[in-house]
Amino acid sequence: MKNNRTPAKLLSLATALALLTAQASAVATGPELPNPGSAPMTHQQQVQLGLQAAQQVYQQMPVLPDNSALTQYVRQLGEKLVAVIPQQYSWPYEFHVIPQKEINAFALPGGQIFINVGTITAASDEAELAGVMAHEMSHVYMQHSAKQAGKTQTTSLIAGIAGAILGATTGGVWGQLAQAGIQFGAQGIILKYSREDEAQADAVGAIIMYKAGYNPKAMADFFQRLAEQGGEPPQFLSDHPNPGNREQAIKQEIAGWPPKNYQTTSAAFKSAHAEAQRAKVYTAEQISAGAKSGEWARLNKQNGAVFAPPAGYAVSQNASADPPTSSAGPVPLESVLPSSKMVKSNVGIVTISRPENWQVTKPNPQGMSEQIAPPAGVTGNSIGYGVIIDAAKPPSGQSMSIDQATQALVSAMQSGGNDLQPVGDAQPIKVAGVEGRSLELQSTSPFPDDNGQTQKERDWLVTVPRPDGTVAYFVFVSPESQFNRFKPTFDRMLKSVKFQ
């Protein structure tokens, strides 16, 4: 399958050169924000994914209403930081506050940013809080999520979002977001970035802070103080791995910048800090329990905390499952029909027999998911004929029955705003001697029918529990009208499975 995406190493090199260029000109003019480069997803797609995910946050976590004092303050501070970003590189940034005790913050593609009350309480001054916010804004600015994503169709969403809701960074889709690290767990949405992403977010965040009048060193100071705390590290540090000596790296970066009278704090921060200490907050465990019972959706609505997209935007209900593009034409059946000759292959977590004329590929080179498909049955990052194979595990400390895990996978697939729907109920099935679940689903195929019209797709989901607590899953795919032609091959493949 041809991969049109720019290799990650080249993107990293381009970013590094841009940052070095900014630093080289800093002595005379001060630092300039780098060109963030391009991503496989369009600006609109990133915004839509972020808006859809933000809606999920409001369902899974408590969020303070827009008129709360803390939200108003955080948004004012956010606007000050956004103002220094060149318009051509900016996003519809919006800031929200979660009444959670633990220290954390996360940014969704397209600019939706969430700050825990615990982060406001932990900040010593406004500069430190601005540092956290600038860091999160930089993940959006550099398009870290989208650069690991790619435009996908409904079927492609299965691998990534499915793993994401179970708390695993399994590849494939919103791997897209799961790879970039967005996970939908019982505690809401958690991001996990690479050390390279963190280094870039530190560097770009330092420039945003400088331009907004804050000492970039305050960002490193805050992170360093968190790292020096005893006991288990804050969630923020777990999700944002230290790229190295943050303080030294930032000091080195800003060494040649023109001197500036930095703002350290403000009366507004002091008032917000006091308000944060008085605010009713919840622990991660309480938020997890509330998410399961649906408490936060009810409480947010009662408190007037209802998510609304920024002016000029609307939340598309089908943004993640775009209809087939004109480049995906009808597929001749003879080009995708499976060979009768089967060959064994090691595919990720299993050994499986596949048709000789179907190939094994990784939709996302950095992901764990793999697919077996005829070359003509793949368009872009979407598979219209074949099977996706992957595994996921529940969030740390949680366990799920196979029925719960199967339902979580289905819910995750549907949370992307696509048209995926179950057909009937999950049924018992044995795979390699282990009882799992079988469930058929219906969605839209990335390929049109012979007349060029959109057609339905059948996605056969099979889940299997593993001794280590993970859940292996297979998604067998074909247009619904042709599913019975492919089902015997899918059965043979499934019967041949041996776990490694």
Image: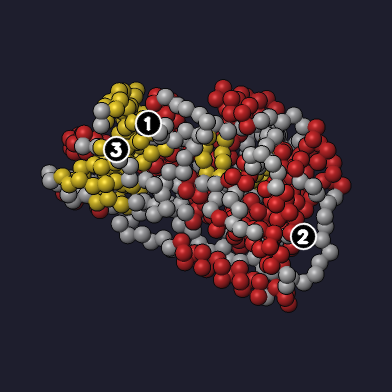
On the image, the x and y values in percent for residue 34 come to 61, 66
Residue hosting label 3: 499
* Residue 273 in view in this figure: yes
Mark 1–mark 3 Cα distance, whole angstroms, equals 11 Å
Quarter of the figure with residue 204: bottom right
- The residue carrying pointer 2 sits among few (fewer than 14), some (14 to 19) or many (20 or more) residues within 10 Å by Cα, namely many
> For the residue marked with disc 3, what is the amino acid?
Phe
- Which residue occupies the extreme left position in the image? 340
Give the residue displayed 70% in from the left and 52% down from the top: 224
Residue hosting label 2: 215
Upstream in sequence: badge 1 or badge 2: 2
Query: CB of mark 2 within 8 Å of CB of mark 3?
Result: no
Q: Tell me: 354 left or right of 436.
A: left
Provide the secondary structure element on which disc 1 rests: loop
Quarter of the figure with residue 238: top right
Mark 2–mark 3 Cα distance, whole angstroms, equals 53 Å
Give the residue displayed 73% in from the left and 60% down from the top: 216
On the image, the x and y values in percent for residue 476 come to 28, 38
- The residue carrying pointer 1 sits among few (fewer than 14), some (14 to 19) or many (20 or more) residues within 10 Å by Cα, namely few
On the image, the x and y values in percent for residue 41 come to 47, 54
Upstream in sequence: badge 1 or badge 3: 1
Residue hosting label 1: 467
